[in-house]
Image (tube, helix red, strand yellow):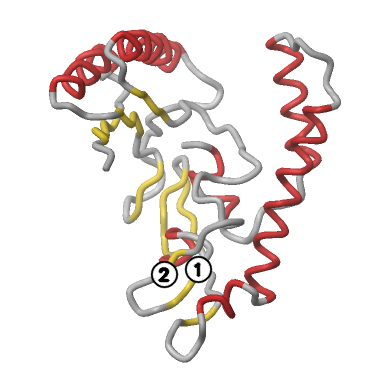
Amino acid sequence: MEIVLRFVMQREGGAELEGIVELAAALGADSVDFTHCDVVREVPAGRPALFAAPADARVRELEKALRRARKRARKLDLEVRATSFVPEEQPVCAHDPRFALFVRHDGSVSPCQNLGIGGSVCFLGTDVELPVASYGRLIGQDLLELWRSQACREVRDRFAARVAAQEEAVSGGVFPLSVRRLSETLEAARAAMPEPPAGCRSCRHLYDL
């Protein structure tokens, strides 16, 4: 069993991060997840985003605060995980539909929670409609059958191709890479990736948010 303390970061809350780490250690937690709610459901578009792209001065202050919190966590033997402050497109999200499925309450099977529920969301200040992607339902269908279905294979293959494109771009780089060269290499990898499945383009998880 793992005990995780999740804390929602805010622009004005940088000074709190080290305190949250110390609190987590005092409570006997194994790790701290620093996240934010820059993508929320049922909120009108146009509200100010918590974080910006590119990073502004306040974001850079938060990045420094997070580095201090990580340093404090290492001394306390505590793991710290954190979402990005700015959108950084990933080849595949943390849900990784190459190896996982989401089963909704009614038995509908989808690549992940967001595509299993769908609906209106506010993504970086813009209203978007996430589609519902379903491989089928467990009522009358076998889970392994759905895993082997064409729809599921297409999603898995798309993400596998994106990961392969990134690995190829990175492996072709000259190491050790400078910060600038690494950024250019990752940008080239993103350009080489095939488009993600429908709905993922407007999902925070693909951008490590």
Amino acid type at image mark 1? Ser
Q: Quadrant of residue 135?
A: bottom right
Residue 110's label in the rendered image is 1
Q: Earlier in the sequence, mark 1 or mark 2?
A: 2
Circle 1 Cα neighbour tier, 10 Å, few/some/many (<14 / 14–19 / ≥20): many
In this rendering, position of residue 105 left or right of residue 91: left
Residue 10: x %, y % from top left: 30, 26
- Image point 71% across, 51% down: which residue? 160
Q: Quadrant of residue 87?
A: top right
Tell me if residue 45 comes above or below residue 81 in the rendering: below
Distance from Cα at disc 1 to Cα at disc 2: 6 Å
Circle 2 Cα neighbour tier, 10 Å, few/some/many (<14 / 14–19 / ≥20): some
- Image point 51% across, 28% down: which residue? 86
Kindly identify which residue carries mark 2. Answer: 103
In this rendering, position of residue 27 left or right of residue 146: left
Residue 22: x %, y % from top left: 20, 16
Residue 205: x %, y % from top left: 49, 44
Going by the picture, which residue comes out furthest to the front?
A: 1
Tell me if residue 176 comes above or below residue 99 in the rendering: above
- Image point 81% across, 28% down: which residue? 171
Going by the picture, which residue comes out furthest to the left?
A: 27
Amino acid type at image mark 2? Val
- Image point 62% across, 61% down: which residue? 198
Query: Please, what secondary structure does the residue beneath circle 1 have?
Result: strand
In the rendered structure, are the residues bearing label 1 and label 2 in contact, judged by CB atoms less than 8 Å apart?
yes
In this rendering, position of residue 75 left or right of residue 186: left
Residue 177: x %, y % from top left: 75, 12
Tell me if residue 87 comes above or below residue 150 in the rendering: above
